[in-house]
Image (tube, coloured by chain):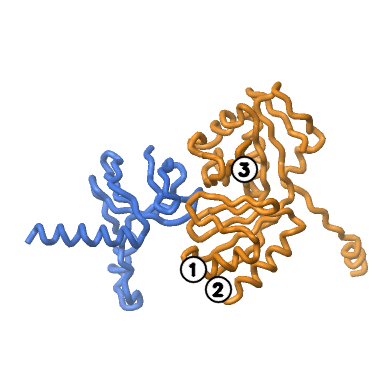
Amino acid sequence: MSNLELNLSQFSPVMQTPLQHFNLSAKQEKMTDAKGVWAHEMALLGYIHLRGNAQNKDFLTAVKKATGVDLPTAACSISVASAITMLNLSPDEWMLICPREQRAGLQKKLEAALTGIHSQVLDSSGGYTSVWLQGKQATDALQHCTVYNLHALTPNKVVGTTFGKASVIIYRLDNGFCLVLRRSFADYIWRYLARAAAPYGLGIAAL
Amino acid sequence: MFVINCPHCQEAREEEEFHYEGEAFIARPANPEAETDDAWGDYLFMKKNPKGWHWEMWNHATGCRKILVAKRNTANHAIAGSWTLSEARKVYDKEQYDAEQATK
């Protein structure tokens, strides 16, 4: 018994990304034209799933009040603000991505604003990670991995689609793609992506 | 392989993104306790298996994860249309009604 107590007192959990074992931060380099694809993990962000009725004006107003950003109600659209990205995943479901340290505050504000409105706010931060992809051949490399026609993925659009045998959420900004992937598939997806990008030259971009 | 238009994502997507969910608009017995085993077994297992037009449900599994209804030709994979469940119900009911009127 005393042993157990001792062990618990020494237990200090450490937050690690699901791509920790690739040690990507040690491989970082400055972006050049020598490599066609540049990737890096946007590690340990905060992910909140928000559900509610987009036809309900009170719901939209409450979300705007809590976050300061308009909820993207059009299919496959996103809202980008300085500290928060909102993805429209389905007609009644959104994913809010923010820095990890702001997650708890954002969730509290949403829950407070949405009190009495039929909705759900769920912290999914433990379940996801993001990989950023850019470079002049990023589209070619990513197209090997998915059935979605990436030329139809215009900036500020998000789609959920296949990635090899798994699935990812991909959204595009002006200068590249962001893959939002499940923690449990992170190893598979990173290896798949690295293999697909190898012929073009894959570099780990320094942040 | 074919392309299905997802009414929720409002976009045509590859079949690979979808999962088949079986025949659409099978009415669940209102009082299952009172059903005979045969009737319940029919409800569960006896599906239409036509060569031709078929009303069926699909799940946009990697996308919005919502159910949609497609009218698909099982012989040549032509798709007459795809709708949300409630919109499809109206089209389906009208088609059933028109077919009934035509046979009278």
Please name the residue that numbered disc 3 is placed on.
A179
The reply to whether discs 3 and 1 touch (Cβ–Cβ < 8 Å) is no
Please name the residue that numbered disc 1 is placed on.
A56
Residue visible at 65% across and 49% down in the picture? A184
Of residues A29 and A146, the one drawn nearer to the viewer in this rendering: A29
Instruction: Establish whether labels 3 and 1 are both on one chain.
Output: yes
- Callout 3 environment at 10 Å: few (<14), some (14 to 19), or many (20+)? many
The reply to whether discs 2 and 1 touch (Cβ–Cβ < 8 Å) is yes
Residue A142 % position (x, y): 58, 33
- The numbered dot on residue A117 is 2
| Chain containing the residue with disc 2 | A
Image colour for chain B is blue
Which structural element holds mark 3?
strand
Residue visible at 69% across and 24% down in the picture? A35
Colour orange, chain: A
Quarter location, residue A127 = bottom right
Which structural element holds mark 1?
loop
Who comes first in sequence, dot 2 or dot 1?
1
- Callout 1 environment at 10 Å: few (<14), some (14 to 19), or many (20+)? few
Which amino acid type is marked by label 1?
Asn
Instruction: Establish whether labels 2 and 1 are both on one chain.
Output: yes
Residue A104 % position (x, y): 73, 63
Q: Is residue A10 left or right of residue A127?
A: right
| Chain containing the residue with disc 3 | A
Quarter location, residue A38 = top right
